[in-house]
Amino acid sequence: MDDEYAKLIRRMNPPRVVIDNNACENATVIQVDSVNKHGILLDVVQVISDMNLVITKAYISSDGVWFMDVFNVIDRNGNKIRDKEVIDYIQRRIENNPSFAPSLRESVGVVPTEEHTVIELTGTDRPGLLSEICAVLTDLHCNVATAEIWTHNTRAAAVVHVTDDSSGCAIKDPSRLSTIRDLLSNVLRGSNDPKTARTTLSPPGVTNRDRRLHQIMFADRDYERIEREGRGGLGDRDKRPLPHVTVVDCVEKDYTVVTMRAKDRPKLLFDIVCTLTDMQYVVFHGVVKTLRTEAFQEFYIRHVDGFPISLEAERERLVQCLEAAIERRASEGMELELCTKDRVGLLSDITRIFRENSLCIKRAEISTEEGMARDTFYVTDVTGNPVDPKIIDSIRRQIGDKVLNVKHSSSISPKAPQPTTIGFLLGNFFKARSFQNFKLIRSYS
């Protein structure tokens, strides 16, 4: 009965979304008011992230039964959101209008589809792994339509959408699916692997692809630090480069406070909120701010049971998981962009060339739009160091100078952060205002 009553309240009070291009000089302001429920913050941030928008500031409050958030957003070029179709899409997605069917291409991986077979992979990372996976799929007459591959802390995970290369439809034959699963599992099994490699064939669902990758790597415990020569243990965290995460108590308000400082990048807030939500934490208050190339985030959280974190081991685990969430999508190495007419076996050929030239793929985004393959690869050499430009020049001559372009090279680590203190963003707020008198700030500079 309580659950049905909660559903009735939400139906009577649907989310209200205001998108304003006049409230802020250099960003579009999205304000969301709604009845509070677990996961609603992630739902809103996911919509913004799916549209490839950048959140420059955010103010979050969901204390009690009402959820009130404000986001300052820009596009990837640093401009306000002027496209009426995009604005209408965001508003309808958040308000969850049942008559609206998402149709923009940015929603790939969010909306259910019967056109693809979804393959989820996880195992030990090694040079050439993606090339071997693509070769097996090609031999099995599978065409990769879209895919995303992450590597972190010696682990690799992927969500791949494939079709039959002759019919262009999803593969449904149980015997063939079993063969695909068995052969891919053989590829993923590394020698002396303490963790089990897994291949899962699943029907399409509504889970966001990025969120699913976080869930796969979390289940694989990629957040557990591996001791390396010349690298200290967890006690040396403050000496390491960004990200820097702290989890401390706010005793006077009965919250746990999470503060984060990291190099800014797209979808950073989504990665943090996704991890907190899937670990069963609720964000009651928060502030997000970006300064040049750095991002600062602070959240006042409790567990879904209403209690703050009480055990040091749980605090340490949360720090490790949030650091892993930040690092998984970090753009490590040289960014290569491939754009050419799609064909069966293209991805297998490209990744084979990378492997033959001793390139290691750290992350990849594979997509097909209107018959064109648009793929992005982040690569290093096999030791994890920057790639020799001469090797890239050789590969481009082999593939085609206009087909493969170098977009970015990130080989310089940011400086180590200075220690932060509790409440550096919201501390004064708690001193000056009570929760009952809290009102959202509606204008910013």
Image (cartoon, rainbow, N blue to C red):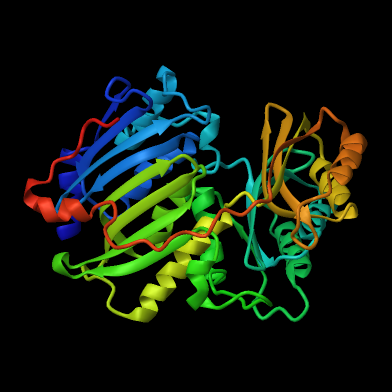
Q: Is residue 1 visible?
A: no
Out of 347 and 102, give the one closest to the viewer. 347
Q: Is residue 186 visible?
A: yes
Quadrant into which the N terminus falls: bottom left
Out of 97 and 178, give the one closest to the viewer. 97
Q: Is residue 413 above or below residue 288?
A: below
Q: Is residue 338 above or below residue 87?
A: below
Q: Quadrant of residue 127?
A: bottom right
| Number of marks | 0
Q: Position of residue 177 (x, y in %)?
A: 71, 58
In this rendering, position of residue 66 left or right of residue 38 = left
Q: Is residue 333 above or below residue 382?
A: above
Residue drawn at (21%, 32%), measured in percent from left and top? 442
Q: Position of residue 100 (x, y in %)?
A: 38, 29
In this rendering, position of residue 102 left or right of residue 434 = right
Residue drawn at (13%, 41%), measured in percent from left and top? 439
Q: Is residue 178 above or below residue 397?
A: below
Residue drawn at (82%, 49%), measured in percent from left and top? 351
